[in-house]
Amino acid sequence: MSDIEDVDKRFNELTAQIDRNEQRKMNKAAAQEWARLPRVRRRRNRRIAAFTVVAVMAGAGLFVAYRPEVVSMIPGVVSERFSNMDVDALRLGQVPEETTPVDVRPPKLSPFEGSPAKNYADGAKGLVMPAARATGGLSRKDVATALQRTRDMLKASHLDRKTLMGGKPTALTKLLHSEQRVWFLKNLDHRSPKKNAWDSRYWVTSLAPKTAELATDVIKVKGRTKYSDFREDGRSGVRIRVNYLFVYAIHRPGRPEPTQRIIAHNLGEIHAYRENGELVIWLADWNADGVAGARCDTYDGFAHPFYDDSVPDEEALKATGAPVDPYDLDDDVDDERCSLTTGT
């Protein structure tokens, strides 16, 4: 038998002498290592394979303690053998394909992260109407109809994509009473808006064309609807009051980063009553509290986002008083002038 064959034989004898209990300890330790891996990255880790090599060497050390005469006959063989062996031969089998390293970059955060809006409902899910009951001389069915129309108007004013991106507010227009519809269209989108002029575009949230894109299709919504009976000008019926925040994540057109938020606050009032046998649903006041994060020095009814690199807002420079919290539903600022906010 050649010296090389003799070395191989003795080496095989060496590794074969590792006690089965030690093998079980190795397998248990490897299993524990596996179990410790985070649940979100439940895949094999190269540390497991490396651990196996160390354990084999430790087993060899135990064998040396029991059979020193074997090792003394082949000085330097163990270290040389391990240095020349293919390490893959000592691993716990072939590494599965799914254990290949993957991209572990942190996930992209929601554009609402860090703001109260993160916990708001998504879109129309946040428009929850109270239960209908007969009120103000109206039947339960009439009140339910008025509440449903109120919800539809909120959706049309703040969640309709066409309206939001600066298009014609057709969604709201078709929900208005026929007489109010005529007035609304007559006062929509004046060609030469003036500072103290009023445009019915203010009744909806519309981003000025070419000023912004939505960073996400999700619009965060929080608010409430209440109603009570009313008597006014010889009419009696139901007064419905709405108080809602709509939070939009936006960015400059073609520039996904950075994103920012604007917040529309709709304080509104709807009257529902019977007249000549018809159920009339009339907007008495709508979208009264403005948009936070938009410029104050524009007068066309559109929301013009104010970015960090925007030119100064002349009206904002004149603003006085303590900043308001745009996420406060109850912070009704009874002032049509520009107000500073604590941030969006």
Image: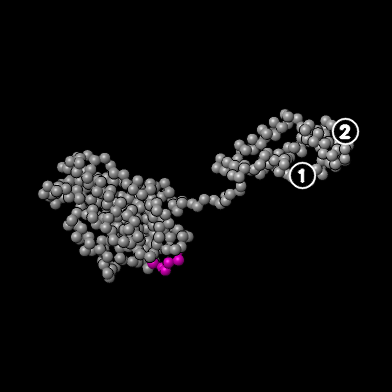
Residue 302 percent location from the top left of the image: 32, 62
Regarding residue 51, the answer to whether it shows in the image is: no
For this view, does 86 lie left or right of residue 317? right
Q: Quadrant of the C terminus?
A: bottom left
The residue under label 1 is 85
Q: Residue at x 21, y 63 (%)?
A: 186
Left or right, residue 184 beside residue 113:
left
- Residue at 56 percent across and 52 percent down: it is 105
Name the one closer to the observer, 230 or 260: 260
Would you say residue 308 sits in the magenta stretch?
yes
In the rendered image, which quarter is residue 310 located in?
bottom left
Magenta span of residues: 307-313
In this view, the residue in front, 45 or 194, is 45
In the rendered image, the vertical position of residue 212 relative to residue 99, given as above or below: below
Q: Residue at point 70% right, 40% down?
A: 91
CB atoms of marks 1 and 2 within 8 Å: no
Residue 197 visible in the picture: yes
**Residue underneath mark 2:** 69
- Toward the viewer: 310 or 96? 96
Identify the element where label 2 is drawn.
helix
Which one is closest to the eye, mark 1 or mark 2? 1
Q: Is residue 178 magenta?
A: no
Q: Position of residue 83 (x, y in %)?
A: 79, 45
Going by the numbered disc 1, the residue's amino acid type is Met
Residue 306 appears in which quarter of the rendering?
Answer: bottom left
In the picture, which quadrant includes the N terminus?
A: top right
> Residue 232, which numbered label?
none
Category of crowding for the residue at label 2, using alpha-carbon neighbours closer than 10 angstroms: few (below 14), some (14–19), many (at least 20): few
